[in-house]
Image (cartoon, rainbow, N blue to C red):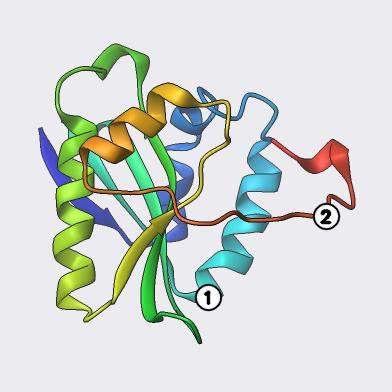
Amino acid sequence: MELREITSKEEMLKNYDLLLEVYPNLTKDEYSSELDLMLQHNYGQAGVFDGEICAGLTGYWIGTKLWCGKYMELDNVVVSKKYRRLGIGNQLFDFFKQKAEEEKCTMLALDSYRKNLPSHDFFEANGYEARGFHFINVLDESKIR
């Protein structure tokens, strides 16, 4: 297994099927359009590959907020059902911790739905703590995945 950064939209689109395991209603056209927007705003991805098969994937942004300075936010921590329990999530988390330190970020952040308790245990085991809330005002429920 090899961990590598995914830098182009074309490479990201090749891993669309893996995202369907988490977002079954995501169309390829939506994903393509959203990548066009996200790539303009410091978005990138890294994946763990078994040959040409992407077994695990995480997206990330590097940004700045007044309350914490420069930070890295992780998105879409997805590991294929076929490859779970092989340490792929840990590989991705270790990679991003190192990358955030190299980028001189003050923290790593990620969002998770409150009901996704198994992921919370995994995040906490990797040094993350729940701090605060994101309050959202949903304007189009049909677009929430």
- Residue where numbered disc 1 is placed: 41
SS for tag 1?
helix
The three-letter code of the residue at mark 1 reads His
- Please state the horizontal and vertical placement of residue 92, each as a whole percent of the image: 22, 44
Horizontal side of 55 relative to 78 (left or right) equals: left
Q: Is 7 rendered above or below residue 20?
A: below
Q: Answer yes or no: do the residues labelled 1 and 2 have beta carbons within 8 Å?
A: no
Residue 51 quadrant: top left
In the foreground, 118 or 4: 118
Crowding at mark 2 (Cα within 10 Å: few <14, some 14-19, many 20+):
few
Name the residue rendered at 64%, 56% in the picture: 34
Q: Where 85 sits versus 55, above or below?
A: above
Residue for badge 2: 137
- Rendered-image quadrant of the N terminus: top left
**How far from the left and from the top, in percent, is residue 77?**
39, 39
Q: Which mark is residue 123?
A: none
In the image: residue 46, left or right of residue 64: left
| Amino acid type, residue under disc 2 in the picture | Asn
- Is the residue marked by circle 1 packed among few (<14), some (14-19), or many (20+) residues within 10 Å? few
Q: Calculate the distance from the C-alpha at mark 1 to the C-alpha at mark 2.
A: 22 Å
Sequence-wise first label, 1 or 2:
1
The percent coordinates of residue 23 (x first, y second) are 60, 30
* Placement of the C terminus among the 4 image quadrants: top right
Vertical arrangement, residue 129 with respect to residue 105, above or below: above
Q: Residue furthest right?
A: 139
What kind of element bears circle 2? loop
Give the residue at x 23% y 57%. 96
Residue at the image position 53 percent from the left and 57 percent from the top = 132
Q: Nearer the viewer, mark 1 or mark 2?
A: 2
Quarter of the rendering containing residue 80: top left
